[in-house]
Image: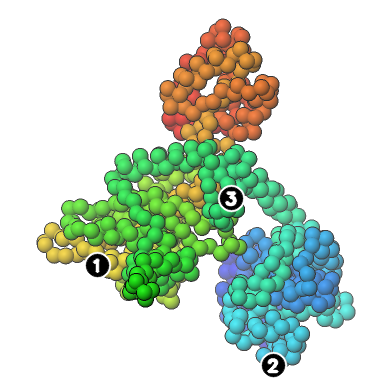
Amino acid sequence: MSLSVTVVSPEPEVREVETGTTAMDVVGQDRSVLVARVNGTLKDLDYVLEPGDVVEAVTAADPEGLAVLRHSCAHVLAQAVQQEFPEAKLGIGPPIKDGFYYDFAVGRPFTPEDLQALEKRMQVILKAGQRFTRRVVTEDEARHELKHEPFKMRLIGSEGGADVMEVGGAELTIYDNVDAKSGERCWGDLCRGPHVPTTRYIAPNAMKLMRSAAAYWLGNQENESLQRIYGTAWASKDELQGYLTFLQEAERRDHRRLGAELDLFSFPEEIGSGLAVFHPKGGVIRRVMEDYSRSRHEAAGYEFVNTPHLTKAQLFETSGHLDWYSEGMYPPMELDAEYTEDGLLRRAPQKYYLKPMNCPMHNLIYRSRGRSYRELPLRLFEFGTVYRYEKSGVVQGLTRARGFTQDDAHIYCTKEQMPGELDTLLTFVLDLLRDYGLTDFYLELSTRDPKKSVGTDEEWAEATEALRVAAEKQGLTLVLDEGGAAFYGPKVSVQAKDAIGRTWQMSTIQVDFQLPQRFDLEYQSADGTRQQPIMIHRALFGSIERFFGVLLEHYAGAFPPWLAPVQVVGIPVTDSHVDYLDQVAASLRAEGVRVEVDASDDRMQKKIRNAQKLKIPYMLIAGDEDVAAGAVSFRYRDGTQRNGIPVSEAVTEIVEAVRNRLQIA
C-alpha cells in the first residue's frame, strides 16, 4: 500500500512511498540533516509519514535545526551529570541563543573541575552513538517513572505548560537514550522533542561547557535555587572555534573593562548596583555625544524641556504604568503626612515614585494650556534621567542599568500629519546613528499582545499599519516581533550591528492613541472643534549610558577623533621641548581641540606606549629638528608616523578630522 507525500528538496516534488515510510527515508540519512519539518512542524527523522504530508530536511544551517542539536546536547549533559552525580535532580534544559543550559538540584555548586569531567563524559556518550527514542506516556505513567525527579513531577500537569521544552503539545512524551549495540535504555528525560537521531550527530569537538551559575526554578526568585550549567554546541569544530574567538574579542571589547582601563566611569559599591558615575574623561565623551544630538534636534525643530525625577503616584495611575509596569519601578516613598499637636494623623502620607519614563510628564507640559492645530506637530525633547528597578541578575554595566538618562522625545501631531512625521522621524534617527559610526541596520516591528495592552483593535491596527508603511520606506529588512509592543501602542525599533556583528536595539518609535485619551489631550482644529492628537514616543539612543557602552564596545575604546576624550597628546623628546609643544597645543585649543602635553618624567617611548594604551588618536612628537623647522613628527594611533610635518599642516589635518567626524584606525 502506498501514499503520496511532497518532499521539499529544494523544489517541492510529489512522491509515492510505502506505508510506514519515515521522514528519514525521504530526506536521506546524511548526518547534516538533523530533523524534518513536516507540514511546518519539526519532527524526529523516524516520524512515520501520512498521506499528503509535506516534508523538508532541516540542517544546522536552519536556526531551528541548530536549536534541536543544542537541545539534544543538553540531554547528553544531563545524562553525564547524573552519571557523575547520581543524587542530582533534573530541572529543565532548553536551547538558547548560541548554546543551551540545564538546571540541576545538587548538594554543592559545580566547580570548573566538575565541568571538565562532565565534558569528557559527554564526549564518551556522543561517540557511543546512543539513539534518541521517543515514547508516548500517560500522566500516571510519567509520574510513576519520574517519581524520583521532583521537578519533573511538577511539570506534569499545568505548572510548566508549553513554556518549557519538557511538556506541551497534544502528547506527553519521554525521550530515551538507547545503546546502539545492545538496545538497552541508558537514560531518559521528560521532553516534547524533537531530537537528532543519535548522539553521533553532535560532534564531540564542536561542543563545550562554558560555565555554571545559580538559577531559580523556572526563573522565579520565590522558587528553589538550582545550579545551572551553560554550554554551547555547533555543527562543526570550526564553527565552535569561530564562536570562541568571537567571545574572546567580545571580552576584549567589554565596556566595563574598558571603562576602568580608560578611566571613563565606575560603579561604586557605596552607590548601588546598576548606578554609574562618570569620570572626567567619560564626562567629556558624554558631553560631546549630547551636544551633537542637541544641535541636530534643534535643526530638526525640537523644543527642549526638563522634568523632575519623582512624582506623585497619581500621575502613573493616570498613565496606566502602575497597572502595567509597577514591577519595573522602585518602591514608593511615603511623604507629606501631617499630624496634630497631640500626634494624631491629620493627613495621610502621599506616595511618590522615582520616574521610570518621561512621557507622562511631557503630557502635562502639553496639557498646561490650550493648543491649536497651528502648533502641531509639537516636538518635545528631554535628556531625562529615569530609574528602573532591574533585577540584580540582569544588571550589566551601562547596557542594563537601574538609573540612566534617556534622549526622550514625544511628538504630538494630527492624524493627517502622522505618516509624514513617522517617515521623517525614521530618516532622522538612522542618519544620526550613522553619524556616530553605526551603519548596519534592520528594523523590528513589535505588535500588540492582547493580554497586556489597552485600546481598541481599530486603533492598534491603524497605528501598526502607519509604522509598517514608514519602516518599509527605509528599504531595510523589517522583522516582525509579535506581541512585543508596550501596553499603549506598537513600536518600530532600530536594530544595529556593531563592529563584530552583534545586534543591539537602538532607537524605538511608538505610536500611541491611548495616553492622549488618558490625559485628555486636545487641540483646536481648523474648523473650531476639539480633537485628540496622536502621540509618538521616540528614544533615539535608548539611553545615553547604554549608547555610550555600545559605542565603547563598537570602537573597542578607540573612539573616532571627534568623540575621543583626549584627541591629541604632545610628546617631547626631552624636557627642553615641552614649551614648544605647549605652543602647538595652544594653537589646537584655539580650534576647540582637546589636547594634552605629557611633561611627566617618563622616557619618550614610555609616553608613546601610554598614549597608545589610552587609545589617543594623535601623538605630536617634537625634538630639536622639529623645533628648528617649526614642525612635529605626526604619529597615529595605529603606530604609523610621518616626520617633519609643519605645525600648521598638522593642526589643519586634526581640526578637519574632528569637524568632519572622520573615522581613523
Residue 458's image quarter?
bottom left
Residue 295's image quarter?
top left
Q: Residue at x 34, y 71 (%)?
A: 341
Give coordinates of residue 422: x percent, y percent. Answer: 33, 55
- Give the residue number, with chain letter if any, for mark 1: 520
Rendered image: mark on residue 140 = 2
Between the C-alphas of marks 2 and 1, the distance is 57 Å
Give coordinates of residue 369: x percent, y percent. Answer: 20, 58
Q: Residue furthest left?
A: 527
Q: Is residue 536 visible?
A: no
Rendered image: mark on residue 283 = none
Label 3 sits on a secondary structure element that is: loop
Residue type, label 3: Pro
Q: Residue at x 52, y 34 (%)?
A: 565
Name the one closer to the observer, 235 or 276.
276
Q: Residue furthest front?
A: 342
For the residues bearing labels 3 and 1, Cβ distance under 8 angstroms = no
As displayed, is residue 185 above or below residue 274?
below
What is the number of callouts on the image?
A: 3
Give coordinates of residue 573: x percent, y percent. Answer: 64, 16
Between the C-alphas of marks 3 and 1, the distance is 43 Å
As displayed, is residue 288 above or below residue 479?
above
Name the one closer to the observer, 351 or 341.
341
- Give the residue number, with chain letter if any, for mark 3: 268
Between the C-alphas of marks 3 and 2, the distance is 54 Å
For the residues bearing labels 3 and 2, Cβ distance under 8 angstroms = no
